Amino acid sequence: INDKINDKINDKINDKINDKINDKISDKINDKINDKISDKISDKINDKINDKINDKINVKINVKINVKINDKINDNNNGN
């Protein structure tokens, strides 16, 4: 009878230990997954922001270039 009781107690203890271990493992896995997802989202957002910034910069540069070109053309057309 004592053996049976001890077996039951040990089973309960082992179940609790395994539950704790599995919870920890699940938490770690979920943390890793969430970190990966967050990193991907951040990368996508940063890519979009950088694209927008680069587009704005390129528009400004192209406007400046076109103004210079037009100034040169106008100077040449005016005989300078």
Image (tube, helix red, strand yellow):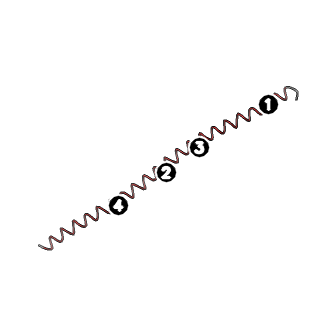
Asked if the residue under mark 2 is in contact with the one under mark 1, i.e. CB atoms within 8 Å, the reply is no
Per the model, the C-alpha gap separating discs 2 and 3 is: 16 Å
Per the model, the C-alpha gap separating discs 4 and 2 is: 22 Å
- To which residue does mark 2 refer? 39
Which quarter of the figure has residue 31? bottom left
Which quarter of the figure has residue 14? bottom left
Q: 10 Å neighbourhood of mark 2: few (<14), some, or many (≥20)?
A: few
Q: Is residue 17 left or right of residue 51?
A: left
- To which residue does mark 4 refer? 24
| Residue at horizontal 61 percent and vertical 41 percent from the top | 53
- To which residue does mark 1 refer? 71
Question: Sequence order check: which comes first, mark 2 or mark 3?
Answer: 2
Asked if the residue under mark 2 is in contact with the one under mark 4, i.e. CB atoms within 8 Å, the reply is no
Q: Amino acid at mark 4?
A: Lys
Where residue 32 sits: x, y (%)?
43, 56
Quadrant in which the N terminus is drawn: bottom left
Q: Amino acid at mark 1?
A: Asp
Q: Amino acid at mark 3?
A: Asn
Q: Judging from the image, what secondary structure is the residue with disc 3 in?
A: helix
Q: How many marks?
A: 4
Q: Is residue 17 left or right of residue 72?
A: left
For residue 50, which numbered disc appears in the image? 3
